[in-house]
Image: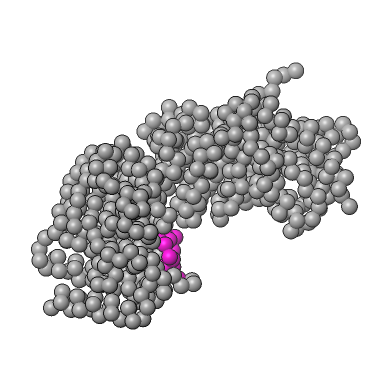
Amino acid sequence: MKPEEKRALQIKACQIRMGIIEGVHAAKSGHPGGSLSIADVLAYLYFKELNIDPADPHKKNRDLMILSKGHTAPGLYSALANRGYFPVEHLKTLRKLDSDLQGHPDMKHTPGVDMSSGSLGQGISVATGAALSAKIDGDAFRVYAILGDGELEEGQVWEAAMFAGHKQLDTLCAIVDFNNLQIDGCLDEVNSPYPIAEKFKAFRWHVIEVDGHDFDQLDAAFAEARATKGKPTVIVMKTVKGKGVSFMENQVGWHGSAPNDEQYEIAMQELNAALAQLQA
Amino acid sequence: MAEIKKQATREAYGQALAEIGAQYDNLIVLDADLSCATKTGTFKKAYPDRFFNCGIAEQNLIGVATGLTITGKLVFCSSFAMFAAGRAYEQVRNAVGYPHNNVKIAATHAGLSVGEDGATHQCNEDIALMRTIPGMTILCPADGNEAKACVRAAAAYNGPVYLRFGRMAVPMLFDDDYAIEIGKGVPMREGTDVTIIATGIMVGMALEAAESLAAEGVSARVINIHTIKPLDKELVLKAARETGAIVTAEEHSIIGGLGGAVAETVAEGCPVPVLRVGVEDKFGTSAPAAQVLQAYGLTPENIAAKAKAAIALKK
């Protein structure tokens, strides 16, 4: 990846993070930790990978992106706003009465949201159905789904994985946000889904393991996913929950709580400083 | 006496799918390893490229159906009622109901008439579960021809529909060219003393009950409710006003199904006695279907007895 392209994506990721903090702070609730951990992959998807058009959110044969880990809607909304689906200022209406920015994604009301989600395990099933649809008609669109690592404890994930592997749905690309934290603690303290890569391999998926904050690795992984035929691909992406806001990083407590005014100021100062450095 | 033609509504469902296959080239049918029993196999035979088996994984079945619909397909997905409405309830609520996706959930083997398989497979709660989902349409046909009419109506309608079919062959009540309008009840017999409001396989029994009541000098109206949601409230309230007593009959729990829907409507709009024939608050049991129905009071005799009891409660 060219340095200037990488920097442009890093800037977008930083702006997505700022939108996450703005939204969750204004709502006084929401899920910042897992939104921040996927900010980089969201930047990559919405500013490089996806064939989409903000002016025509329902464009036929566009790529689909389903946020299976729907609680990280603040991340998705910020990516969509920064991509031009709606004004960034609108992020401050998150979780407020009459806002289309519901606590979890709502495909009927929010431009750019391809599927309502939030109940874990369901998004990957729906993505599998959409990929099957593409295969039936020979359509060229691709389907992406972002899952949490804790979400892998849901049985429906493996029902979908079995079906997608069996049907060889190679337009399907799942992305696992592997940050090793879920609400009640570390994954293997709660109910280990490990080993993740081996499980997907056993379900006949192509598995790629990357650092989810490294754009060169993401770039190579998505190219490899596109080139993989006869199998769905999963990108198991090692991430840091809360990435980009020092006091939120690797802290399970920031899974589902909002920063107070003081914490908000510190977070925005850090992100502004990071942005200024990237823009220098 | 000429033999009355009988057909299970699931049988008609499979035939109807194959019949509309040519009309809807975007029609996809999914099953969960029960295609021989749900009769989606009939469609599979006619359109093998448009049938997909999801295996024994009903949660994923609903998810895959949803994914197909958000990309423009018309999807009918099938399993037994216990698993389509029961096991996958939350998938139906959140992936289909909440976004109002165009998924048709066609559940077979509903109610006690599953018979020998017993309580684990006799789903008497599906209507109640589906009724609580905002925007869900619920269709429950009375015979094979109404089942086909329901499939055609569901295919033409844009939105989530739950279709309820049975395992047991039941007498034909309607002609081949019969059609339904979603949300419109069907008056089957005029009457002035009491109204029997029935759905599914109980419609035939309701007509039998009305016949025996007539012999005793009781004039019973019979209404067939193929659409449990949205309920034809106008027709129900008209019956309450004009006959002053109502009996409901359904092969479902008396809690939350047709009886519940009618009682709620009548209580709010024109309070008159409403007695419910259905599965009392208990689980089913193993035996041949006819014996189970008899044991649980799903009979013309019980409907007739309840009709007289309802009339006695009139003020």
At a point 70% along the width and 46% down the height, the residue shown is B259
Which of the 4 image quadrants contains residue A258?
Answer: bottom left
Q: How many marks?
A: 0
Residue A10 visible to an observer of this rendering: yes
Residue depicted at x 53% and y 43%: B86
Q: Position of residue B215 (x, y in %)?
A: 87, 31
Q: Position of residue B35 (x, y in %)?
A: 46, 30
Q: Residue furthest left?
A: A2
Residue A103 position in % (x across, y down): 43, 65
Nearer to me, B139 or A8: A8
Which residue is drawn at the image coordinates 19% and 66% (left, top)?
A9
Q: Please identify the dominant SS of the magenta region.
A: loop
Q: Position of residue A213 (x, y in %)?
A: 20, 62
Q: Nearer the viewer, residue B295 or B240?
A: B295
Which stretch is magenta? A99-109
Picture layout, residue A156 above or below residue A89: above
Quadrant assignment for the C terminus of chain A: bottom left
Q: Residue at x 28, y 50 (%)?
A: A174
Residue B142 falls inside the magenta stretch: no
Image vertical order of residue A158 relative to residue A186, above or below: above
Q: Quadrant of the rendered structure where residue B143 is? A: top right
Question: Would you place residue A81 above or below residue A140 in this image?
Answer: below
The quarter of the rendered structure image containing the N terminus of chain A is bottom left
The residue sitting at the top extreme is B1
Q: In the drawing, does residue A163 fall left or right of residue B139?
A: left
Task: Left or right? Give the position of A139 relative to B117.
Answer: left
In this orientation, which residue lies closer to the viewer: B83 or B187? B83
Q: Visible in this render: residue B234?
A: no
- On the rendered structure, is A111 left or right of A274? right
